[in-house]
């Protein structure tokens, strides 16, 4: 083949092919009149170089792959040197991602500082684990008084562990379901004014409390623990992974359970959110309700204390 035919076949320019030749990556033959003659092997090398370049491997670092073919490999990555080059490229990408994330974080911090420098509005929350000392205490408005003794409806919710949980078919024993409005993420600002809404702030510390006391909860008589919010499962799964939660989170994006049980909720930032409360469910029936919940970072201990105080009744039942 002539260089034009190879260029058309591999969808590269003749100039690129001459560059590969100058670098010693391909070595075409010569006809009697001096024209370059490319074999099918040469054409394959050009195609492989192009594909590796598409993956981000520089042309001058494709040599181990081409040498793998030359040594008899059926594929360019049949050799240890090729695998090592893949790993080197991955490590380089990881390093660049880390550097870009650090740069993004620094820019985002500068943006927040600049945007709120001359504003009367408080800047967004960046520390999701520490609760301010002046959080407003939520009052009991009676919105959960009707719940004790109510049977959970036949409602199937997605769980972050990949299962579907039918609330009407929970296994025997006590199930703890804590409802929370919105778990913040490091890359997403929580709604403005969040700290000023009674009972809104504290979802991350609450989740960490249930995580840290999970073994104690089970020992005190809870058969299982779930968190529940109106965020979708993908959003919740990031929280489970980041906080290393030993229990699943249930997603009720359509607020079906709120409608079925008339659960307290509120609106913030254009989103419908559950108010913070916790249900102790035994054999499908709501046995006890914690509402309002405060402070959220110590709520798991409050649930443990209640369970320990009611173990006799649970076992007798």
Image: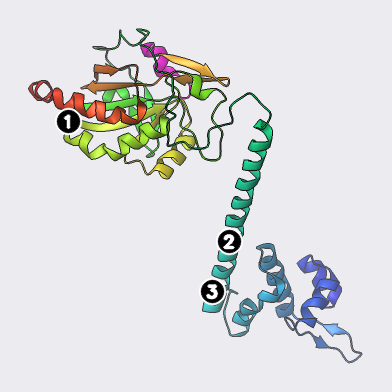
**317 or 95: nearer the eye?**
95
- Sequence order check, earlier mark of 1 and 2: 2
Mark 2 residue element: helix
Q: Quadrant of the N terminus?
A: bottom right
- From the image, tell me which residue sits under label 1: 221
- Sequence order check, earlier mark of 3 and 1: 3
- From the image, tell me which residue sits under label 2: 95
Label 2, label 3: how many angstroms apart (C-alpha)?
Answer: 16 Å
- Up the image or down, 19 lies above or below 122; here it is below
Which numbered disc covers residue 84?
3
- Up the image or down, 236 lies above or below 32; here it is above
Which residue corresponds to the image point at 59% horizontal and 85% vertical from the top-left?
71
Label 1, label 2: how many angstroms apart (C-alpha)?
Answer: 47 Å
Range of the magenta residues? 253-263
x and y, in percent, of residue 28 in the image: 78, 84
**289 or 237: nearer the eye?**
289
x and y, in percent, of residue 116 in the image: 65, 31
Mark 1 residue element: loop
x and y, in percent, of residue 175 in the image: 25, 27
261 within the magenta span: yes
- Up the image or down, 171 lies above or below 284; here it is below
Is 254 placed left or right of 106 in the picture?
Answer: left
């Amino acid at each position: 083949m002539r260089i034009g035919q190879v260029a058309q076949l591999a969808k590269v320019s003749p100039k690129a092919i001459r560059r590969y030749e100058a670098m010693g990556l391909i070595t075409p033959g010569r006809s009697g009149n001096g024209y370059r003659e490319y074999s099918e092997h040469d054409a394959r090398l050009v195609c492989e170089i192009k594909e590796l370049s598409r993956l981000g491997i520089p042309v001058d670092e494709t040599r181990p792959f081409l040498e793998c073919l030359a040594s008899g490999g059926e594929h360019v990555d049949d050799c240890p040197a090729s695998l090592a080059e893949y790993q080197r490229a991955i490590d380089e990408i990881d390093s660049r991602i880390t550097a870009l994330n650090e740069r993004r974080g620094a820019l985002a911090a500068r943006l927040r500082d600049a945007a709120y420098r001359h504003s009367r509005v408080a800047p967004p929350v960046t520390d999701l684990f520490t609760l301010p000392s002046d959080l407003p205490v939520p009052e009991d408005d009676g919105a959960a008084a009707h719940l004790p003794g109510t049977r959970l409806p036949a409602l199937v919710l997605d769980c972050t562990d990949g299962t579907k949980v039918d609330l009407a078919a929970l296994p025997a024993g006590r199930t703890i379901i804590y409802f929370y409005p919105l778990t913040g993420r490091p890359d997403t600002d929580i709604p403005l004014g969040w700290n000023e809404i009674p009972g809104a702030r504290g979802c991350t510390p609450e989740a960490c409390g249930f995580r840290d006391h999970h073994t104690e909860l089970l020992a005190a008589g809870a058969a299982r623990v779930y968190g529940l919010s109106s965020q979708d499962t993908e959003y919740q799964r990031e929280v489970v992974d980041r906080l290393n939660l030993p229990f699943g989170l249930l997603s009720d994006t359509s607020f079906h359970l709120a409608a079925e049980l008339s659960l307290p909720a509120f609106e913030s930032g254009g989103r419908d959110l559950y108010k913070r409360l916790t249900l102790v469910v035994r054999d499908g029936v709501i046995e006890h309700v914690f509402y309002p919940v405060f402070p959220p970072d110590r709520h798991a201990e409050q649930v443990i204390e209640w369970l320990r105080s009611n173990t006799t009744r649970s076992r007798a039942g």
